[in-house]
Amino acid sequence: MTAAPLTHTSPMGPIRSDAGAHLPLGLEAVTITGGSWAPYLERNARTTIPHAQSWMEKLGWVGNFSAVVDGTIAAVRQGREFSDSDVYKLMEAMAWEIGRTGDPDMERRFQELTEVITSAQESDGYLNTRFGHDGQEPRYSDFEWGHELYCAGHMFQTAVARLRTTGPDAFTAAAVRVADHLCEVFGEGGRDAVGGHPEVETALVELGRTLEEPRYTALATRFLELRGRGLLGEIEFGQQYFQDDEPVYEAAVLRGHSVRALYLAAGAIDAAVEAGDAAKVEAIRAQFDRTLARRTYITGGMGSRHMDESFGEDYELPPDVAYCETCAGVAAIQVAHRLLLWTGDEAYADVIERCLFNVVTASVSAEGDAFFYVNPLHQRTEGSTPEADRPTPRASSSQRAPWFTVSCCPTNIARTLASLPAYVATVGEEELVIHQFVTGTVRATVADRRVELRVATDYPADGEVEVQVVAGAGTWTLGLRVPSWCEGATAQVDGEPVEVDAGAGRLSITRSWTAGEVVTLSLPMPARFSRPDPRIDAVRGQVAVERGPLVHCLESVDLGDDVEDAVLDAAAGLEVVDGQVLATISRRSVVERPWPYVATTAPVLPTGGSRQVRLQPYREWGNRGAGTMRVFLPTD
């Protein structure tokens, strides 16, 4: 059932949707000032974004646009066929950051990049450095691998960020010309084709929403309707790799290349919401829910196969060869955010939290200048240190690398963190809901009155969240997510207890508020064992350890030895001391044999004594040098 439409002005965030249970709040409404998230945002602006720009300039990815202008592009072009998209994602991160902080130096650099890029645009609006110029393949001659529509989509998302934060400029004008060109070539009556890498669909819808231009949404819908008809050529991985094996809204589960599948799901939700087609939204929701239940790692990571960066079959979730591409974590956040807005169901806010804490921030180093492309849950060897001055092959890095030959992940991290305030809170009918716990302020119009909240928390170091009503006298509802992992949450308003419904997923307090009142939500955060579904063969008989939203792992740097033969004593329980999780670990007795199987019914017992060992938050692993690591630990 479609909720009654809600309306407000376009938020400074990645999504604008006026249909569904909740409306998004953007960067103009949420300010992060401290707590655990502020350092991530500051480091992203200070280090990660400039780091990405310096690599793209050094490797010639920015220079490709200038080479188009001077006619040398066919001879000198650098980077993969989709390198334009990484420049655009860098600029999207810049646009959000400029909107968030007003950074004048970043504005200057954005304008400099704009001048370089727009100078390469053709008279009919076409803009791409890989195709269509003297000595190159013709335009739109490789839909399977060419990524022309994909690159255009990332340009549109940058334009959306710019329009929603700063306003129209030379970059947004160029993006509109590209969009108009696509409508002319691929719109109704035009060429029947889809891009091998979905992304343009969600970008077109957001550009259409921002400019109130229905042609762009219509083109996105057309691309979605054409996918699944086998328009893309056969490849060794099958057409499900491109999600071109069956119609988008008829599939049962996400499949094929995980990032492609998730971007497509986000676009399919957007187009269905714009059309008011609740059945189609629910179809994608069902696909995503089944994917969460059967094809997702405990970290929120998606994609279990290296060979085609794809989802495996149900419960095919090996920890040591997990792909879990960082971009898939970003894309899962995008899908979950859209479903949160549509349904108001906090389960999707839980997904966002899991991916933010255990995929996105796990990828980036503590310094903000090195990254994991893939995120395994079990590192068997220390591996080698990536070269500091050369890009690393994307899946070969066993430690965080400063850059990759395919560097979609660093720029995806940058744009996600720069727009993070947009994922914090939403508004519904007479309700303001905080979904992600940050220290800062939240401002919104609720029940026709301006409300301002001041939030203070050290989450996830502890589970205390304090919300003070600064403004907003009158009757309305304050909602605070109660995470699904939490048991025994309690709450107070000015010291008076408030009942928390354990099964609701949200504490909702409706009352006549006065300025100065303080709500305190207390989320108990003991360390806990998490047992996998027995159908996940790869980790049957093992357990993981979590505390609050953080997955933990055992690192060799803490064990003082390799983690391969470590055994966790579950009977000894877990202990939290000064915020650190301690587990009792012993070592398995191992006998080397010429044949690795033996006929015996006797269990292999731990040996060598046991001791308490610190378990590191998974998102921080690998920051203390090379080593081995595992999330799931055997208990015998």
Image: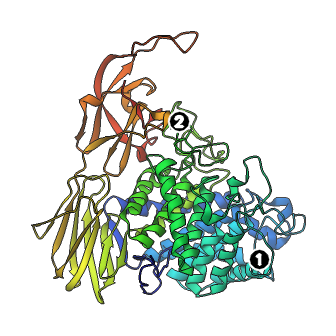
What is the crowding at mark 1: few (fewer than 14 residues within 10 Å), some, or many (at least 20)?
A: some
- In which quadrant of the rendered image does the C terminus lie? top left
Camera-side mark, 2 or 1: 1
Amino acid type, label 1: Phe
Res. 134 image quadrant: bottom right
Vertical relation: 534 (above or below) 8: above
Vertical relation: 621 (above or below) 197: above
Can you give x and y, in whole percent of width and height, for residue 600 in the image?
A: 45, 11
Q: Residue furthest bottom?
A: 448
Res. 584 image quadrant: top left
- In which quadrant of the rendered image does the N terminus lie? bottom left
Q: What residue sits 54% from the left and 77% below the top? A: 277
Total marks placed: 2
Q: How far apart are marks 2 and 1 (CA)?
A: 43 Å
Local secondary structure at mark 2: loop
Do the residues under discs 2 and 1 have CB atoms within 8 angstroms? no
Residue 415 visible? The answer is: no
Q: What residue sits 79% from the left and 60% below the top? A: 77
Can you give x and y, in whole percent of width and height, for residue 227 in the image?
A: 70, 65
Say which of 405 and 214 sits in front: 214
Please give the residue where the numbered disc 2 appears in the rendered image.
Answer: 320
Vertical relation: 234 (above or below) 29: above
Please give the residue where the numbered disc 1 appears in the rendered image.
Answer: 186
